[in-house]
Amino acid sequence: MLEDKNQQKTSLAELGEFGLINHITQYFKINKASTIRGVGDDAAVLDASEKQTLVTTDLLVEGVHFDLSYMPLKHLGYKSIMVNLSDVYAMGGEAEQVTVSIAVSNRFPLEAIEELYAGIQLACDTYNVDLIGGDTTSSTKGILISVTAIGKVDKGEAVYRNTAKETDLIVVSGDLGAAYLGLQVLEREKQVFKVDPNNQPDLDNYTYLIERQLKPEARKDVVGLLKDLEVKPTSMIDISDGLSSELFHICTQSKVGCKIYEDKLPLDPQVISTCEEFELDSTMVALSGGEDYELLFTVPIADFDKIKGNPNFSIIGHVTAENQGLQLITRAGQEIELKAQGWNALNKE
Amino acid sequence: MLEDKNQQKTSLAELGEFGLINHITQYFKINKASTIRGVGDDAAVLDASEKQTLVTTDLLVEGVHFDLSYMPLKHLGYKSIMVNLSDVYAMGGEAEQVTVSIAVSNRFPLEAIEELYAGIQLACDTYNVDLIGGDTTSSTKGILISVTAIGKVDKGEAVYRNTAKETDLIVVSGDLGAAYLGLQVLEREKQVFKVDPNNQPDLDNYTYLIERQLKPEARKDVVGLLKDLEVKPTSMIDISDGLSSELFHICTQSKVGCKIYEDKLPLDPQVISTCEEFELDSTMVALSGGEDYELLFTVPIADFDKIKGNPNFSIIGHVTAENQGLQLITRAGQEIELKAQGWNALNKE
C-alpha cells in the first residue's frame, strides 16, 4: 500500500477528524481569485462571476474502480482529480475548484492518506485548481473518494452532448485504448506476483500504457487549442467509458447517427504491439477500453482544414442522420453496427 | 430494508448504470432559474450571478453514519440532503442545487434505490433545490451517499465561523439533544427486536426524538427570520457534531472564549423525560449529542431585544475574551471548562 514499507504509521483515530483535516489541508494554498473562502467553514465561498458555473462529480471506489495492489495512493489521488477536471474541459470550460471527500477504513494510517493528498495536491497545482472543501470519514471497508469539480465557462459557450449536427466531423484528441491495456498489464503482473513474489517484472514495453492507466492527464489544453484554431465544437464529451459508449451518448442525445472509420482510430504503437501480445483486437480495445480521458467532439465540416493534420487531433468519422444508426466502417470497407452496450463488455460496473 | 417486504425487486445489474440514472432522474424537474443544465452531460451548468456561490459536501456511510435496520431508505435520502443544506443555511445563504452520488452493493434492488431517491426528491421539492448531477456506482459493501450542495449569498454577506466578537450573545435555534436520544431509542429497540422479533415497540413517548433522528429539517427559515428581525449574525455554524464541538470551532477560529449557561440550554420535554429514563445527563446530551441541525450563531449585544423572547431562538450565553476559555456555568453557578473534545465521546468517528 505504501511505497516505503518501513515508514512511520500514525493511526487516524489518534488524530481525530478535525486533526486529520487540519493536517491534510495545511499544505494546500488558495490560488484562484474566485475562491473567497476554502476549507474551514460550513461551506466554501466562491466569488460572483459573469461566467456560468460548471459542476461535475465522480466517485472512485476501491475494488470497483481501482486496486491498491498496483495503484499507488499518490497516483490514485491524482487520478481522482483528473477524472473530474476532464468533465469540466469536456464542457469547454476551465476548472477552478474541487472538493474531495474520502471514506477510509482504519487499516489506512495517516501516512497513506498523506500520499493520497500529495497526489491530489500535485493535480491541483499542475492544473491550477483550488481544493475548497470536503469531508473525511471512516468506512467499514476500503477507501472511497468522492470529488466534485467546479469550473467556469463564458455565458452561452458551454459545449453540450446534444448539439451534434448531421455532416459534422467527429474528432478525438490523443490516442485510444492505452489506459485499458495498461490495466491488463498491471492485472497480469499482479497474478505473476501472487505466484512468484520475487519475480521482477520487466515493464519497459508498457511504460506508456501503464502511465495512461495510473496517471492520466485531463485534456485542459484542448479547449485552448480549439480556441486558437478558431474552432467551436458543436458537441463534446470526455472518453471515460470508451469511445463507443461516448459516441452513443452524443448520437442519442443529439438525435443523429455516425460513421466511424476503423483505420482512422488513433492507436499508440504500444497499444498495437500489446494487443498482439494479449491477442486482443485493437479496434475493440479502442472502442470499448475506457479511461482514456481524451475528448471526443464534433466540428462543422467547414472546419476540416483547421483540424486536419493537427497532431493533437484525429478525424475519425462524421455525423449522419439518426436513422443510419452508429456504424463502424472496417478496414475491409464493411459496415458494422456499433453496439450501444459496447462499453458494458469491459466496464467493471 | 424495504418497508413492504413483498414488493418487486429489480436487479441494478439488469438496468446498467445509464439505465439507472435515467430511471432515477426522470421524476426530478428543474425549478431554479439558475440551473441552465442539470443531469445528463459531463457537468451541470449554472447561470452567472451577481451573488457569491456556496459549496459544501458531506459523505454518509452505512455502518458509520446510519443503520438501515431502523433508518428507512426514504428518510436516509431526505436526511442526506438536509445535512448539506444545513451547511448552506449556516453561511446565511440560500441553497439552490445538489449533486448526489451513491455507491451501492448489489444487495440493493432498484426498488431500494427508488426509495432513497424518493426521499431525496421530497427534500429537493420541500426546500426548492434542483438535483443537477451525481454518479452511481457499485460498492463492495453497503451503501454510501455523497452529496454536494451549492447555494448563493449576497456578495460579502456570507456568515463565517471566525468573526464572533467579544460580548456578542450566543444564540441557538430550536432545541438540542433530541436527535441523539432518538438514536438511543432506536438502538435499544433494535436490541429488543433481536431478542424478540415479535415484540411491538411502543414509541409514543419518543415520537419527537425519533423524528429528529430520522427526518431532521435544515433551518432554512432562520436566515429569513434573522433578516426580518434585522439581525446580522456575526458568526454562524450548524450543529452537526454537538453544541460543544461547534462552540469550539467558533471560539477557536474567532480567537475568543465563551460562557454558556446550563439553565439556558433549550431542551424538549421528551429530551428531559428520556434522559431520566436512560439515566443520561441532559446537559451532556445537549452539549455533545450532535445531529440536531440547528443553527448556532452570535449577534451583537445590541440585538438582545430583537432576539429575546423569540420562540425560535434561545440566548444561551455570550462571547468572552480568548484567555477565558470555553466555560459552562452550571445551574448551581459552578464554572466548568467545556472540553474541546466533548463531541468525541459520543461521535462515532
Image: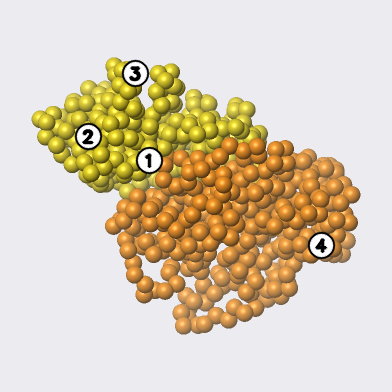
Chain colours: A yellow, B orange
Which sits earlier in the primary sequence, circle 3 or circle 2?
A: 2
Tell me the amino acid under the disc marked 1: Asn
**Lateral position of residue B42 relative to residue A347, left or right:** right
**Residue contact at pointers 4 and 1, CB within 8 angstroms:** no
Tell me the amino acid under the disc marked 4: Asn
**Does dot 1 land on a helix, a strand or a loop?**
loop
* Rendered residue at 73%/73% (across/down): B269
* Rendered residue at 73%/62% (across/down): B174
Badge 3 is on which residue?
A: A306
For marks 3 and 4, give the CA distance. 68 Å
Mark 2 surroundings within 10 Å by alpha-carbon count, few (fewer than 14), some (14 through 19), many (20 or more): many
**Between A194 and A29, which is closer to the camera in this rendering?**
A29
Badge 2 is on which residue?
A: A259
Tell me the amino acid under the disc marked 2: Lys
> Residue A170 in the image: x percent, y percent?
29, 30
Chain of the residue that carries numbered disc 4 in the rendered image: B
User: Is label 2 on the same chain as label 1?
Assistant: yes
For marks 4 and 1, give the CA distance. 52 Å
For marks 2 and 1, give the CA distance. 17 Å
Tell me the amino acid under the disc marked 3: Lys
Q: Is residue A135 visible?
A: no
Which sits earlier in the primary sequence, circle 1 or circle 3?
A: 1
**Does dot 4 land on a helix, a strand or a loop?**
loop
**Between B95 and B331, which is closer to the camera in this rendering?**
B95
User: Is label 4 on the same chain as label 2?
Assistant: no
For marks 3 and 2, give the CA distance. 21 Å
Mark 3 surroundings within 10 Å by alpha-carbon count, few (fewer than 14), some (14 through 19), many (20 or more): few
* Rendered residue at 66%/60% (across/down): B292
